[in-house]
Image (spheres, rainbow, N blue to C red):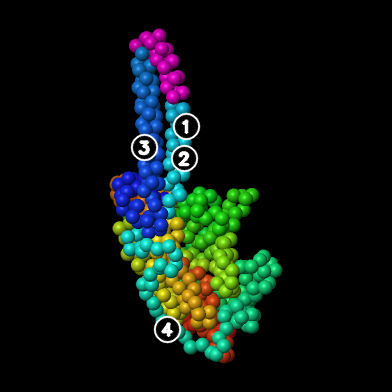
Amino acid sequence: MLLIQDIRENHDALVARLAKRGIAAAPIFDAIIKQDDARKAIQKQLDDTLSASNNMAKQIGDLFKAGDAQGAQALKAKTAALKDTTKELQVQLQSAVDALQALVIELPNAPHDSVATGKSAADNEVVATWGSDIPLPKAAKPHWELCQELGIIDFETGVKITGAGFPVYVNKGARLQRALINYFLDYNTKAGYTEYQPPYFINEASGYGTGQLPDKEGQMYHMTADNLFAIPTAEVPITNMYRDTILKTEDLPVKCTAHTPCFRREAGSYGKDVRGLNRLHQFDKVEIVVIANPEESYRLLDEMVQHVGELLQSLGLKHRVLRLCGGDMGFTSALTYDFEVWSAAQERWLEVSSVSNFETFQSNRLKCRYRSGKDKPQLVHTLNGSSLALPRVMAALLENYQTESGIQIPEVLVPYTGFSTI
């Protein structure tokens, strides 16, 4: 959530940054400032009324001590009127706060200065590429055909059990999935990330804290009886561990990693883009989350991008890095880099990771702050990235490493799988 102080002090700069998303923010900012002025005016009235009540209470005490009971009783009658005024002003203040919140909460994060103006993925910038095509056998097959022939992922049984987008991993398919999870976690912990296993369900406060609510409620599975949501990513429970927390400067950065299943109702469009593992309702992902001092957050973002890139290199997967344009970024992000691996069999790029800096957008909602010595607490910056999302990594490995005699397993995974071919 944008800071109202920033909207006031950096009005023109924020208008220009939000224009990169195609948002005309100036009239919205004007409405926010007007509503904030109204809130401040009511707050001042309330403060003045409370101050008058306190002074009057002191005067009543002094009059009683002086033996002037009549004068004290006369003032008491006035305090009753002030109490009624106080209650009325408190109601007005809450209404003003709610109206202000409703205006601010609808605004997405302001893009970083390096973000390009754009409307869609077609406007994203390719900032790096790595690797080359792996020679494939003649009549190379997409992963959904390979999975069926090898019996390692059963899509039809998943449809029978639950529905489309819920595959069943079988035998070496299940073992390869588990191997990738363990490899990614080990890779992250060796780089200094602390491993967690968080809950897979969150409450409304957690969804609000990281920006899923009220923006993405339609994309999450909601258990109405308990008012809980299935997590769309480990980012949500991990980041919310630091909700309503004041960290010490020396505690930063906090670096976390976790594996969780992820649940998303929106499966996207129809056709080849969603076939097989390309887009699922339930999938596994290993996440990295960083809570940072604002002065270090963009250096740490670069480190995270390098970390994810080297992880993909270790798997030998050709990939590219995109800096997303304003129109293609997530609601909460100030700057996002996407990683896409090349699927030679499908002849298309598959997104496997997004690495983002949210600056203070999430921490303002979370009330996650840090303090240096006796200084006033300041908001942290939050960052996160996929390291990695499994379905499309699995798809790319199966397709790019297919041979006439089966699927070759990258060397780094063999100690985890216990086999070198499928």
Q: Closer to the camera, 340 or 315?
A: 340
Seen at 57% across and 65% down, the residue is 267
Amino acid type at image mark 4: Ser
Look at mark 2 in the image and give the residue it sits on: 98
- Graded by Cα atoms within 10 Å as few (under 14), some (14 to 19) or many (20 or more), the crowding at tag 1 reads few
State the separation of the CA atoms marked 2 and 4.
Answer: 54 Å
Mark 3 and mark 2 residues within 8 Å of each other at the beta carbon:
no
Which residue is depicted at the point 37% across and 62% down? 117
Amino acid, disc 2: Asp
Q: Position of residue 152 (x, y in %)?
A: 62, 78
What amino acid type is highlighted by mark number 1? Answer: Val
Q: Which residue is mark 1?
A: 91
At 63% from the left and 82% from the top, the residue drawn is 150
Q: Which residues are magenta?
A: 64-85
User: What whole-number distance in Å separates the C-alpha atoms at marks 4 and 3?
Assistant: 58 Å
Q: Nearer the viewer, residue 287 or 324?
A: 324
Between disc 2 and disc 1, whose residue precedes?
1
Q: CA distance from mark 3 to mark 2?
A: 14 Å
Q: Which mark is residue 132?
A: 4
Q: Secondary structure at mark 3?
A: helix
Mark 3 — residue?
37
237 left or right, relative to 361: right
Q: Position of residue 377 (x, y in %)?
A: 34, 47
Residue 419: percent from the left, percent from the top?
Answer: 55, 84
What SS does tag 4 mark?
loop
Residue 339 marker: none
Work out whether 114 lies above or below 371: below
Task: Label 2: state its secondary structure.
Answer: helix
**Does the magenta stretch mainly form a helix, a strand or a loop?**
helix
Q: Amino acid at mark 3?
A: Asp
